[in-house]
């Protein structure tokens, strides 16, 4: 059931489904990886910022494509972010989307560039 945006802890408007995905992922990280509340809050905030960015582009977290992730990282770089911050954001997104894929919440991982291979057949001339 699709609902409108909700106000989440990171002060970003997002779809209720996105909020639930972020909440479940952060709970998973807290339990499995031993995240403390501060680390979980930072992760929740970063993912919520991305969810808001995706929503502004007309997509939910399940509908995100690789270009959305690249645009998000580029946007924060243009705001004065350095390469280590950009790498950290990409790492968090890769971890999130890998978890979604492993838990069958998405079919393709948008954090991985899906390159289409093209083949060239050079036939011998006789």
Image (cartoon, rainbow, N blue to C red):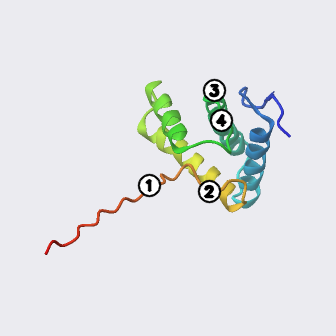
- Viewer-side label of 2, 3: 3
How far apart are the two marked residues, 4 and 2, measured between alpha carbons?
A: 18 Å
Q: What secondary structure is found at the residue carrying circle 1? A: loop
Q: Is residue 14 left or right of residue 75?
A: right
Percent position of residue 118, x then y: 36, 59
Who comes first in sequence, dot 2 or dot 3? 3
- Looking at the rendering, in which quadrant would you find the N terminus? top right
**Residue behind mark 3:** 56
Q: Is residue 58 left or right of residue 85?
A: right
Furthest-bottom residue in this view = 126
Who comes first in sequence, dot 4 or dot 2? 4
- Viewer-side label of 4, 2: 4
- Viewer-side label of 1, 3: 1
Percent position of residue 45, x then y: 68, 35
**Residue behind mark 4:** 59
Residue at point 74%, 53% (across, down): 30
**Residue behind mark 2:** 98
Q: Is disc 2 surrounded by few (<14), some (14 to 19) or many (20+) residues within 10 Å?
A: some
């Amino acid at each position: 059931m699709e609902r409108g945006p909700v106000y989440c802890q990171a002060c970003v408007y997002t779809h209720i489904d996105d909020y639930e995905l972020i909440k479940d992922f952060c709970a998973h990280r807290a339990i499995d990886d031993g995240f403390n509340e501060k680390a979980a809050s930072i992760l929740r905030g970063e993912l919520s910022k991305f969810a808001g960015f995706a929503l502004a582009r007309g997509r939910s977290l399940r509908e995100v494509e690789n270009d959305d992730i690249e645009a998000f990282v580029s946007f924060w770089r243009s705001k004065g972010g350095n390469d280590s911050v950009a790498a950290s954001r990409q790492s968090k997104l890769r971890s999130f989307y890998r978890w979604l894929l492993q838990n069958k919440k998405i079919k393709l991982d948008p954090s991985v560039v899906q390159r289409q291979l093209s083949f060239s057949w050079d036939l011998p001339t006789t």
